[in-house]
C-alpha cells in the first residue's frame, strides 16, 4: 500500500467514525403506562373488584380532574385495552363522542381513554389488545389435583383475594387519581405478577409443566399487545399514554423498559 493510499484510507475511516459520533441520538418516545381497575363488572377475570358507580356525579368530577391532569402530557396517542380487530368500531364510537353524539359507557376505556383523547384533540384512539385464549388454564386445576398441588391454588386464591380487598378498601376511600397512584406502585405491580410466577408456574413442574405453559399464555398475550404498541407508534410520536388493566402493566413495563426506543414514565410522576 502506497503512502497516499494509506492516508486516504485513514481519512475515510476517520470521516466515518466522526460522522457516526456526531449524529444525534434518536429521541425516545415517552410512554405512560396507566394500570387501571375495571370500572364495569363482571368480567372474565377470576379475581376482580365489585366496583362502585363510576357514572355518579362525584366520580365523573374525579374523572374530569384526572383527564385534565393527563392532558398536560400533550400525548400524541392514547392506547386502550380494546382488540386491534375492533379498531373500526371504536373509531366510529370515538368520532361520535367527539361530535357529542355518543354518551360514554361505564368502561374505563371510554371514561378515561375517550375522555382524554378528546381533550387532546386526537383524531383517533388506538386499540392494541389481543384476546389470546388461555388454553392451559383448564388443565391447571386438574394437574394440581393429580400432583397433590392443590395447596398452590388455595394459596393463590388467598393472596389474590387479599390484594382485591386491599384495592377495594382504597377505591372506597379515595379519588380515582389516588386509586391509580396506589395500584401503579412497584409493590402492587409485583404482587399481581407474583400470583403467576409464585403459584401457577409451579403446577406440574418436573413433569408436564402445565403451570408454566399457562403462565406462558399470559406472557404471549402481553407480548402481542407490546408488538401492537410498537407497530402503532411512529417516529413523530413524542408521548404515548397506554391505559390497561393493572395486571398487564408489570409485563408490558418490563418489555418497554428494555426497548431503547422508549422511555417509560412513572404514573406517580404525572399524577402528583
Image (tube, rainbow, N blue to C red):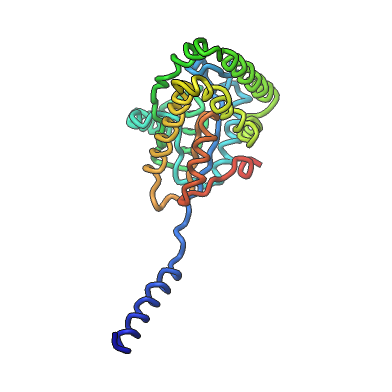
**Picture coordinates of residue 72, whole percent (x, y):** 56, 46
Residue nearer the viewer, 113 or 205: 205
| Picture coordinates of residue 163, whole percent (x, y) | 64, 23
Residue found at x 41% / y 28% = 101
Question: Is residue 187 or residue 80 the one in the foreground?
Answer: 187
* Position of residue 91 in the picture relative to residue 267 (left or right): left
Quarter holding the C terminus is top right
Front residue of this view, candidates 261 and 258: 258
Residue 53, quarter of the rendered image: top right
Residue that extends furthest to the bottom in the rendered view of this protein: 3
Front-most of 164 and 158?
158
Residue 159 x %, y %:
63, 20
Q: Residue at x 45, y 51 (%)?
A: 261
Q: Does 250 sit above or below residue 206?
A: below
Q: Residue at x 43, y 67 (%)?
A: 23
Q: What residue is shown at x 58% (from left), y 26% (from top)?
A: 198
Task: From the top left corner, tell me how far across and down residue 27 is, in percent.
Answer: 47, 57
Q: Is residue 198 above or below residue 50?
A: below
Q: Is residue 85 left or right of residue 261?
A: left
Question: Is 72 placed above or below 155 here?
Answer: below
- Total marks shown come to 0
| Quarter of the image that includes the N terminus | bottom left
Residue lying farthest right? Answer: 173
Amino acid at each position: 500500500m502506497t503512502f497516499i493510499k494509506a492516508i486516504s484510507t485513514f481519512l475515510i475511516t476517520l470521516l466515518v467514525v466522526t460522522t457516526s459520533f456526531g449524529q444525534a441520538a434518536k429521541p425516545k418516545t415517552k410512554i405512560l403506562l396507566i394500570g387501571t381497575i375495571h370500572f364495569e363488572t363482571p368480567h372474565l377475570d377470576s379475581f376482580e373488584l365489585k366496583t362502585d358507580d363510576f357514572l355518579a356525579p362525584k366520580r365523573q368530577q374525579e374523572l374530569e380532574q384526572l383527564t385534565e391532569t393527563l392532558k398536560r402530557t400533550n400525548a400524541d396517542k392514547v392506547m386502550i385495552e380494546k382488540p386491534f380487530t375492533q379498531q373500526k368500531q371504536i373509531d366510529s364510537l370515538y368520532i361520535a363522542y367527539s361530535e357529542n353524539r355518543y354518551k360514554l359507557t361505564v368502561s374505563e376505556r371510554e371514561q378515561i381513554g375517550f375522555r382524554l383523547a378528546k381533550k387532546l384533540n386526537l383524531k383517533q384512539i388506538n386499540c392494541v389488545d389481543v384476546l389470546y385464549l388461555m388454553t392451559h388454564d383448564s388443565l391447571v386445576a386438574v394437574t394440581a389435583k393429580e400432583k397433590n398441588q392443590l395447596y398452590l391454588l388455595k394459596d393463590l386464591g388467598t393472596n389474590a383475594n387479599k390484594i382485591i380487598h386491599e384495592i377495594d378498601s382504597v377505591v372506597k376511600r379515595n379519588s380515582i387519581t389516588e386509586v391509580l397512584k396506589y395500584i401503579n406502585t412497584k409493590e402492587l405491580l409485583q404482587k399481581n405478577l407474583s400470583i403467576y410466577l409464585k403459584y401457577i408456574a409451579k403446577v406440574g413442574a418436573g413433569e408436564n409443566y402445565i403451570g408454566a405453559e399457562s403462565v406462558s399464555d399470559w406472557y404471549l398475550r402481553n407480548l402481542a399487545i407490546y408488538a401492537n404498541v410498537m407497530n402503532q407508534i411512529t417516529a413523530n410520536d413524542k408521548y404515548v399514554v397506554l391505559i390497561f388493566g393493572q395486571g398487564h402493566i408489570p409485563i408490558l413495563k418490563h418489555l418497554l423498559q428494555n426497548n431503547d426506543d422508549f422511555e417509560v414514565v412513572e404514573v406517580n410522576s404525572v399524577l402528583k
